[in-house]
């Protein structure tokens, strides 16, 4: 590939990275504001207008804190674990279509790439728990990794049902296949399963057992401080943003503008792309809100309930849904 | 492009493989194994086998090494318990065998040097999910069903073994 | 084909770079005032007893094992999913049969209590045992059913 044709990709890469970090930082801010609103409090409002500079202040504060690793910890792995978490989160943006033809790498196996990267999240969590050599961290890490792998199966099956409908693994094709009707309407059960597993994969309430404060202090990142703690935090919020983006892509028509076929063809190309990007980020933003909303509404599961939900209910349900979707596909 | 990818991935695969056997801490061995599997995925990619490459990451790096890590943690090996890596009486034999293997592979490569491999125009189409599916659900459909039973047996076996420990 | 993956390679490198930068900055900027108390694992103010790296329940190991099996089964279905209609009815029924076998496996594990993480809590203790707590803990029972 000639270097000139790589330049737009580089620009897109920079823009996507910037957008991801900004969105993750502001998801933290909005989480605090919305939780305050739900609980009838005020929330952060001191730093800048409406507290909008709060994320910046948080980052600066974290940077100037002491970075502590327990004496008995495995220093190298202790350092590596948050790096794996952040890398796995950032790497997901590679195959997300932001608009028509606006995608970093529209590869043949796009959606599988996302699943593969997601499956690497386990390492960041398991290793941080093991490397810390602390009981809370280890138990949290172990619980979390068992939880992640338990819900990955149902997630894979939900993705599979979408693939059956769009007949392609390319993310751009999955979006284009929803031009007539969004997948959420054709495959509501699959959407529900994917949403639940997405909550579990991001370790968010009601599935935040790995960091259940009352039992495990902070779970796998108990022994992390300074920016390394911040890295786990950033990775968690990036995963919230990215899961929302994947939900949008798979079930809510991705960048497709609702009723776009009525007026999109009359617009100039730049306006079309702009609208599509807006539509993509708008839908993603909505699901970020859903993530926050659910966290402050639903209490935490117990571990036995979590395991039963994953293996005994969600997994067979996802298999059934796959068969039904395929049957519908064969008949109509 | 293909050659560059092959070179980098092959080098990383060797680094990973050597790391697996020389690392003293088994957790590091498992991580080197992940590096090795990633490089193998890269090698598959250089052969245009995209589906195989991503499956390699999902199944091997995402599932099997996780199990290895769990087992390593379950066994709770301390570095003190592990034997040091050193050459003892079997050392000369090991060196001899390795050299012999190296020689054999080297001779194989030497004999192929200069031979030309015309690129198969079909190669790009073979590595796709679609062609894989046509083969798997055509000629090998029986095998596909047998795999289900085989995996069921594996599952029952692992449950039985794990449960027996408690008795 | 390979060119399409170039941006992904770049992305992976950039992602690793960003992560390393964040970890590096963290160690570089902050103050460094370690003391022995600060460097022991956090256990809510208690002095830690023993090491954290103890053996755990075999159940975690089982879950990882089952995950591999089911993961392989899901991956096998992708080549079918992209061409359900082209492959036709015979393959559809073959896949249904495959999924039935998969579900038998799940059902077996369920019956064996692999997904049952509160078995001990639900079993009522005999009164004599409940009184003498000092007695050695009873050996965990295998799963009947």
Image (cartoon, coloured by chain):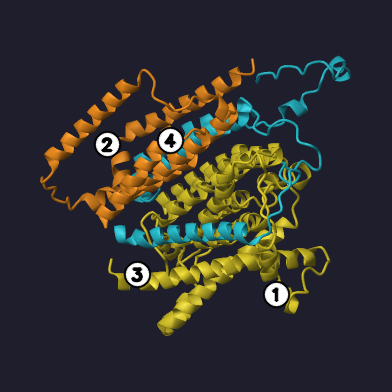
Chain colours: A yellow, B orange, C cyan
Does mark 2 fall on the same chain as mark 3? Answer: no
Which mark, residue A133?
A: none
Camera-nearest label, 3 or 2: 3
Quadrant that contains the C terminus of chain A: bottom left
Q: Chain of mark 1?
A: A
Which mark, residue A6?
A: 3
Mark 3–mark 2 Cα distance, whole angstroms, equals: 41 Å
- Which secondary structure, mark 1? loop
Tell me residue A299's x, y (percent): 76, 50
N-term mark: 4 or 2: 4
Within-10-Å neighbours for mark 1: few <14, some 14–19, many 20+: some
- Which secondary structure, mark 3? helix
Q: Mark 2 — residue?
A: B139
- Which secondary structure, mark 4? helix
Camera-nearest label, 1 or 4: 4
Q: Quick check: B113 left or right of A24?
A: left
Please say whether residue A212 is visible from this viewpoint.
Answer: yes
Q: Quick check: C120 left or right of A320?
A: right
Q: Quadrant of residue A235?
A: bottom right
Mark 4–mark 3 Cα distance, whole angstroms, equals: 36 Å
Mark 1–mark 4 Cα distance, whole angstroms, equals: 48 Å
Camera-nearest label, 4 or 2: 4
Q: Chain of mark 2?
A: B
Tell me residue C114's x, y (percent): 61, 29
Camera-nearest label, 2 or 1: 1
Does mark 3 fall on the same chain as mark 4? Answer: no
Q: Mark 4 — residue?
A: B20
Mark 2–mark 1 Cα distance, whole angstroms, equals: 61 Å
Q: Mark 1 — residue?
A: A52
Mark 3–mark 1 Cα distance, whole angstroms, equals: 35 Å
Mark 4–mark 2 Cα distance, whole angstroms, equals: 38 Å
């Amino acid at each position: 590939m000639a270097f000139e044709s790589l330049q737009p990709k580089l620009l897109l890469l920079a823009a996507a990275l910037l957008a991801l970090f900004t969105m993750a930082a502001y998801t933290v801010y909005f989480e605090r504001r919305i939780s305050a609103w739900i609980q009838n409090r005020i929330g952060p409002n001191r730093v800048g207008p409406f507290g909008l500079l709060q994320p910046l202040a948080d980052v600066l504060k974290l940077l100037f804190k002491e970075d502590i690793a327990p004496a008995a910890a495995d220093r190298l792995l202790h350092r590596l674990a948050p790096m794996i978490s952040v890398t796995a989160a950032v790497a997901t943006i590679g195959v997300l279509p932001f608009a028509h033809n606006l995608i970093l790498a529209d590869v043949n196996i796009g959606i599988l790439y996302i699943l593969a990267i997601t499956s690497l999240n386990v390492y960041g969590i398991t290793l941080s728990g093991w490397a810390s050599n602390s009981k809370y961290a280890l138990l949290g890490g172990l619980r979390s990794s068992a939880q992640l792998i338990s819900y990955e199966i149902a997630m894979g099956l939900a993705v599979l049902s979408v693939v059956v409908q769009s007949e392609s693994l390319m993310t751009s094709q999955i979006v284009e296949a929803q031009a007539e009707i969004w997948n959420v309407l054709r495959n509501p059960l699959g959407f529900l399963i994917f949403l639940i597993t997405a909550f579990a994969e991001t370790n968010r309430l009601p599935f935040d057992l790995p960091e259940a404060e009352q039992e495990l202090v902070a779970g796998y990142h108990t022994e992390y401080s300074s920016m390394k703690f911040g890295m786990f935090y950033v990775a968690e919020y990036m995963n919230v943003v990215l899961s929302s983006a994947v939900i949008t892509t798979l079930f809510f028509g991705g960048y497709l503008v609702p009723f776009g076929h009525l007026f999109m063809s009359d617009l100039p190309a730049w306006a079309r792309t702009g609208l599509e990007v807006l539509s993509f980020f708008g839908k993603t933003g909505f699901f970020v809100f859903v993530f926050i909303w659910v966290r402050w509404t639903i209490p935490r599961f117990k571990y036995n309930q979590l395991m039963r939900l994953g293996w005994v209910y969600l997994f067979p349900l996802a298999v059934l849904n796959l068969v039904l979707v395929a049957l519908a596909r064969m008949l109509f | 492009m293909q050659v560059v990818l092959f070179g980098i991935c092959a080098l990383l695969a060797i680094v990973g493989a050597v790391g697996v056997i020389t690392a003293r801490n088994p957790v590091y061995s498992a991580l080197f194994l992940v590096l090795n599997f990633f490089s193998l995925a890269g090698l598959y990619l250089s052969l245009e086998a995209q589906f195989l490459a991503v499956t390699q990451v999902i199944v091997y790096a995402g599932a099997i090494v996780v199990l290895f890590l769990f087992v390593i943690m379950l066994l709770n090996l301390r570095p003190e318990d592990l034997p040091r890596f050193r050459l003892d009486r079997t050392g000369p034999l090991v060196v001899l065998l390795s050299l012999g293997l190296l020689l054999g592979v080297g001779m194989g490569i030497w004999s192929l040097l200069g031979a030309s491999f015309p690129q198969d125009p079909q190669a790009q189409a073979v590595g796709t999910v679609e062609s894989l599916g046509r083969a798997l659900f055509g000629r090998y459909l029986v095998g596909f069903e047998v795999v289900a039973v085989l995996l069921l047996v594996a599952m029952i076996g692992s449950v039985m073994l794990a449960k027996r420990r408690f008795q | 084909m390979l060119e399409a993956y170039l941006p992904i390679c770049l992305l992976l490198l950039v992602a690793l770079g960003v992560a390393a930068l964040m970890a590096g900055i963290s160690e570089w900027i902050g103050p460094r005032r370690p003391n022995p108390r600060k460097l022991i694992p956090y256990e809510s103010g208690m002095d830690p007893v023993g090491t954290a790296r103890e053996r755990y329940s075999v159940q975690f190991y089982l879950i990882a094992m089952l995950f591999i099996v089911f993961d392989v089964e899901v991956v096998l279905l992708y080549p079918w999913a992209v061409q359900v209609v082209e492959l036709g009815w015979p393959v559809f029924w073959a896949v249904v049969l495959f999924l039935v076998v998969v579900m038998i496996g799940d059902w077996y594990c369920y019956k064996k209590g692999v997904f049952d993480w509160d078995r001990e809590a639900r079993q009522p203790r005999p009164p004599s045992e409940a009184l003498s707590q000092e007695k050695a803990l009873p050996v965990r029972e295998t799963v009947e059913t």
